[in-house]
Image (cartoon, rainbow, N blue to C red):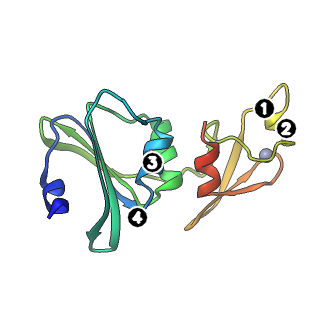
């Protein structure tokens, strides 16, 4: 019953990130830098039943997402849908798009990579798979999956 209540509960202004792969909601919050006291209301629903199986939902009041944050979400939750809410209405709804080139938002996990040297080069990856997500470093060829990405998000 708690799930039902949560699904119909509306927020006035903010964002709803829906269709997050089951179990990834906390990681989405982590990559958005949302931990502990953020000064806005946060609703988290995990393991919610949907047509395509279980999913997670995150609602954040009085918050917007920029392109960079949308790219980060796409990398760990490629199925996510972002709803922008204004005055209790959905004013924009779109699916996240996994970027083909991931630039400056993930650090390469190879400590010897040129992007991790004293005069670092901006990290850049190519997306080589979207299901599951795998990105490959342009400089050293290291491949990273979504777990690695969560750990190395900038
Ligand atoms: Zn590298």
Q: Please tell me whether residue 111 is drawn above or below residue 145 in the rendered image.
A: above
The residue indicated by pointer 1 is 121
Mark 1 → mark 2, Cα distance in angstroms: 7 Å
Q: Which numbered disc flags the more N-terminal residue, 3 or 1?
A: 3
Q: Which numbered disc flags the more N-terminal residue, 1 or 2?
A: 2
Give the image location of residue 74, x and y in percent: 48, 52
Q: Which numbered disc flags the more N-terminal residue, 2 or 3?
A: 3
Q: Cβ(mark 2) to ligand 1 < 8 Å?
A: yes
The residue indicated by pointer 4 is 22
Q: Is residue 4 found left or right of 54 in the rendered image?
A: left
Residue 28 is labelled as 3
Local SS, label 3? helix
Q: Which numbered disc flags the more N-terminal residue, 4 or 1?
A: 4
Q: Nearer the viewer, residue 113 or 44?
A: 44
Give the image location of residue 68, x and y in percent: 50, 37
CB contact under 8 Å: marks 2 and 3: no
Q: Residue at x 78, y 32 (%)?
A: 121
Q: Which numbered disc flags the more N-terminal residue, 2 or 4?
A: 4
For the residue carrying disc 2, how many other residues have a C-alpha within 10 Å: few (<14), some (14-19), or many (20+)? Answer: some
Observer-side mark, 2 or 3, equals 3
Q: Is residue 17 visible?
A: no
Q: Residue at x 83, y 49 (%)?
A: 140
Local SS, label 4? loop
Give the image location of residue 59, x and y in percent: 28, 45
Mark 2 → mark 4, Cα distance in angstroms: 35 Å
CB contact under 8 Å: marks 4 and 1: no
For the residue carrying disc 4, how many other residues have a C-alpha within 10 Å: few (<14), some (14-19), or many (20+)? Answer: some
Q: Nearer the viewer, residue 126 or 108?
A: 108
CB contact under 8 Å: marks 2 and 4: no
Q: Is residue 113 found left or right of 100 in the rendered image?
A: right
Q: Residue at x 13, y 42 (%)?
A: 89
Local SS, label 2? helix
């Amino acid at each position: 019953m708690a799930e039902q209540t949560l699904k119909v509960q509306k927020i006035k202004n903010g964002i709803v990130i829906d269709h997050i792969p089951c179990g990834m909601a906390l990681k989405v919050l982590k990559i958005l830098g949302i931990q502990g006291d953020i000064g806005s209301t946060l609703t988290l629903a995990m393991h919610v039943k949907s047509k395509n199986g279980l999913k997670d939902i995150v609602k954040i009041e009085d918050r917007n997402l920029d392109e960079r944050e949308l790219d980060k979400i796409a990398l760990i939750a490629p199925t996510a849908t972002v709803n922008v809410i204004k005055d209790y209405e959905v004013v924009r709804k779109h699916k996240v798009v996994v970027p083909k080139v991931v630039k400056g938002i993930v650090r390469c996990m190879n400590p010897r990579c040129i992007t991790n040297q004293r005069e670092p080069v901006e990290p850049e990856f190519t997306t080589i798979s979207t299901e599951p997500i795998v990105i490959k470093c342009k400089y050293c060829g290291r491949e990273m999956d979504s777990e690695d990405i969560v750990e190395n998000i900038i």
